[in-house]
Image: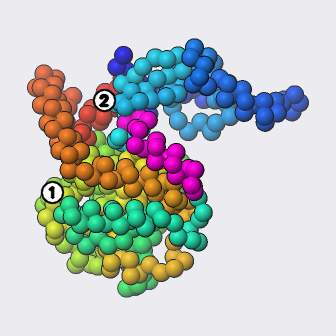
Amino acid sequence: MAHRLSIGAFGALGRLPVRAAVTRAPMNRPTVRALASAAEAAFDEGAHAPRVEAGEAITKEADYMVATYSRPNIMFKSGKGSYLWDTTEKKYLDFTAGIAVNSLGHADEGVTSVIADQAQRLIHACNLYHNPWTGELSRLIVETTLASGAMADASRVFICNSGSEANEAAIKFARKVGKSTSDTKTEFVSFHNSFHGRTMGSLSATPTKKYQAPFGPMLPGFRYGDLNDISALPGLVTAQTCGVIVEPIQGEGGIHTATPEFMVALRRRCDEVGAVLIYDEIQCGLGRTGELWAHAALPREAHPDILTTAKALGNGVPIGATMVTEKVAQKIVVGDHGTTFGGNPLAARVAHHVFARLADAEMLGEVRRKGEVFKRGLEGVRARYPGLVGEIAEGLKTLEEVLAEHAD
Ligand SMILES: Cc1ncc(COP(=O)(O)O)c(C=O)c1O
């Protein structure tokens, strides 16, 4: 049965009640081996009958997890294509897609065979050495981007593990570029209703009170403007600005598309003051609009210096990437930035496979075709229920927002 539980991942289903602090008896603890094999037995796919009621498992485990999420009383244990199954074998149509992650669907055969093959060869050897896949993935992303007509000066890629980390690298790179001009060129600009992540740098660029307030003060030097407000740009982006980060289509605060006029004006203002322009395409990129990158429709004079991506890049295997122009790359030297896991052969090879499929012309054409079907349907819904559907984005980007916002 199609179900709206997927919306819970957006936090729209209300918060869990505050729980009392847990105290545990020091004696009679199960051994690590007993705990591990009990879990294996309970979730064993070979045992056809459902063994675990979600409520039972959730209650048993909840007190061991830091309570950072509000989740419905459902536990997913498997998926195939657009469907998920819970621990009682109930089937769900997955509208969340892992929050813009599972673009190729669950348990995709191509993805799983790449994972299985690479897992038997080499998962990780660290970035002190070369591996066959980090460089190949970087090359594929750059060459495909250039061929697509987006980010005309794309040149090099830094591979990491998540969207926040991709933006964190972008923020650091912009600071380094700014500081090569002047020690005071360190300010950063982002826009209201944006979302750039939860690490302190990316959170400082995410001006949403509920995310920032518990962890303030934010990093100094972050300023916020309104998307599409061209007249405010001269006061917002100044000689002290080293970087500006913007989503070509905002996702978190509802679908808000940056206008081409605004993006051209923003690019021009960044050039005037020597600031690095960063496009966060972590949610809106990788084919979601029917183009490889969401900014593809923008003229060259609006192209960014840095583009960040993550989410669908690994179809669920954690990975992120920060693509830069040669001008930015020249300011980054050995030792400036790094990561233990980023670009390990497993994640990089999976992303290589996933990216090639998402960038494929036939796949992008299919997204545009399905996007038109949803667009017509949503326009019909808007005519019948004015106020329910706001802006309709290209491709497949609008539907999840409508569902998330109206989950209650
Ligand atoms: C536009 C955008 N940027 C950055 C992030 C942060 O990515 P991650 O959760 O992988 O750190 C997100 C996550 O929702 C996002 O939507």
Asked if residue 109 is among those painted magenta in the image, a careful observer would answer: yes
Question: Where does the N terminus fall, quadrant-wise?
Answer: top left
Residue 213 vertical placement versus 219 (above, below): above
Residue 121 in picture, x, y percent from top left: 57, 55
Q: Please say whether residue 332 is visible from this viewpoint.
A: yes
Helix, strand or loop at disc 1? helix
Q: Mark 2 or mark 1: which comes first in sequence?
A: 1
* Nearer to the camera, 283 or 342: 342
Name the image quarter holding residue 45: top right
Q: Which residue is drawn at 41% across and 81% down?
A: 331
Question: Where does the C terminus fall, quadrant-wise?
Answer: top left
Residue 369 vertical placement versus 352 (above, below): above
Q: Residue at x 21, y 64 (%)?
A: 147
Q: What residue type is labelled 2?
A: Leu
Q: Residue at x 60, y 29 (%)?
A: 18
Q: Please say whether residue 99 is visible from this viewpoint.
A: no
- Circle 1 sits on which residue? 297
- Left-right relation of 121 to 185: right
Residue 239 vertical placement versus 288 (above, below): below
Q: Which amino acid does label 1 sit on?
A: Ala
Magenta residue span: 105-123
Asked if residue 130 is among those painted magenta in the image, a careful observer would answer: no
